Amino acid sequence: MHNPFPSGSPTVSTTPDFSKLIAPGSDSDLPLSDAITKLVTMEQFNLAFAIYCGWSVIAWLSHMAGMVSISMQTAVTNLIGICATNVLFFTIARSQAPHRPSEEITALAQSVVGIAWATLFTFMSSGSHELSIGIYASVLLFAMLRVRRNVLNRLTVFAVSSYLTIFIIKMLTREPPSITPASLVQILIFISIMLCLVGTGRYVYRHYNRIKGEYSQLQQRFRSEYAGSGVNSVNRRYILDLLARHKGRTDRSNITFCICIFNADYVDMTTLKPQQDVKRLALRNVEAVIRAELRDMDSLNGTSSHDCFEAYSEKTFIAILPDTNLTGAQCAAERIITTATMQDDIIDNHTRLCGGVAEYRRGEIISVLLERAEEALNTARALNTSCVCISGHSPPKKYNAAVVRLKTSRR
């Protein structure tokens, strides 16, 4: 009897190996969540740095055109300070997760520093009214959706108060001190633009929260469909598509494949809610045993959403065994049942694990193949013990294990 599954076959992990998604040369020893957070922080720094560079070039061009007047010493001082600020934020963005502040705090700090540099530039230059408005507005736009709405409002108040303070100081330092109507119009324009940004931010935040809520609902719906037992669930559709591909390959090459459907039942379905966690844990242990006994070729990759072994319904799992005849599939299923029943911490006196095996017959439609495997599984479950039944064969091999109806959701 040929056994295509050696007992020492490697375990197929049910946890996605996201570390492979990190590009070579990056911090591959970091968890995926930390790598994604670092990537977002770097993108945030790059945007802020681009804003600094853009306005610095515009300020230089305005000075060359005679529209803005600023001394060389002041310009160099500002550039050195801006470069030091960006070096600081670059160091923060590249730091490790335990030492790196959150994205919102980093964005808030960048916005406050940006307003401070805009205020200093406004104070040290002359004729920079329009340029200052653009710098303040770009800082607030940078902070929008990166900080909370009330924080954005406070940043707006800080920007307006800073600009007004500098404006009043410059008016009072004139000889003689005076405030011209043109200056008042400039203040009104600045305040109007800031108020427009506040109103726009309110609109953006409201729609952002609505879209975020709809996205959360779509995520929950996807999870329920993915883990659900309905015929139209994402997982079942994937399995049917995978079976269709194996069917086409077998019809062309005449290399057969088999499917094994396993079911873990718990005897008492009226237990208290705290024991439901025990049932879910038992089902996960059963799933781990089955995965450990499968070959590497029975899995397309290490992620749980693309395994040949998948949750077929709420408490039923299906393993697709390519290049395997009925004898090999029977040996694999029997070994899985034997391994599970020999481990008391997995199959106890309240659990039974049954399996149904069917081999694809050339030209057969997928629904008939699944019906034959499910009929074999139902025959095994009717025996009230852990066992395996083969489609079109009897009697099944029996094992001493108690019955359990395990109702849990797929991991």
Image (cartoon, rainbow, N blue to C red):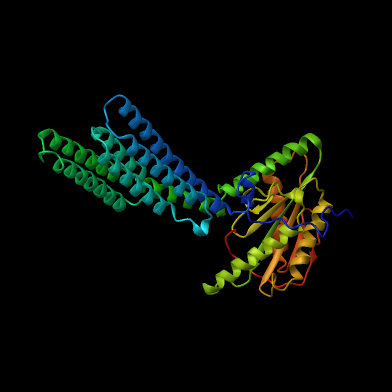
- Left or right of 305, for residue 293: right
The quadrant holding residue 268 is bottom right
Residue at image location 35% in from the left, 48% down from the top:
113
Q: Residue furthest front?
A: 73
Q: Position of residue 192 (x, y in %)?
A: 20, 39
Farthest residue toward the top?
Answer: 65
Q: Between 196 and 315, which is closer to the camera in this rendering?
A: 196
Query: Where is residue 218 drawn, in percent x and y?
Result: 45, 48
Residue drawn at x 30%, y 40% as measured from the top left: 121
Visible residue check, residue 252: yes
Horizontal relation, residue 188 to residue 274: left or right: left
Indicate the quadrant where residue 181 lies. Answer: top left
Looking at the image, is 276 positioned above or below residue 176? below
- On the question of residue 269 being in view, the answer is no
The C terminus lies in quadrant: bottom right
- In-front residue for pair 38/88: 88
Q: Residue at position x 16%, y 44% from top?
A: 168
What quarter of the picture does the N terminus occupy?
bottom right
Q: Which of 67 and 409 is in front in this view?
A: 67
Indicate whether 168 appears above or below 253: below
Q: How many numbered discs, if any?
A: 0
Nearer-the-camera pick, 191 or 210: 191
* 230 sits to left or right of 316: left
Residue 60, percent from left and from top:
35, 30
Where does the image place residue 224, in percent across and percent down from the top left?
Answer: 51, 53
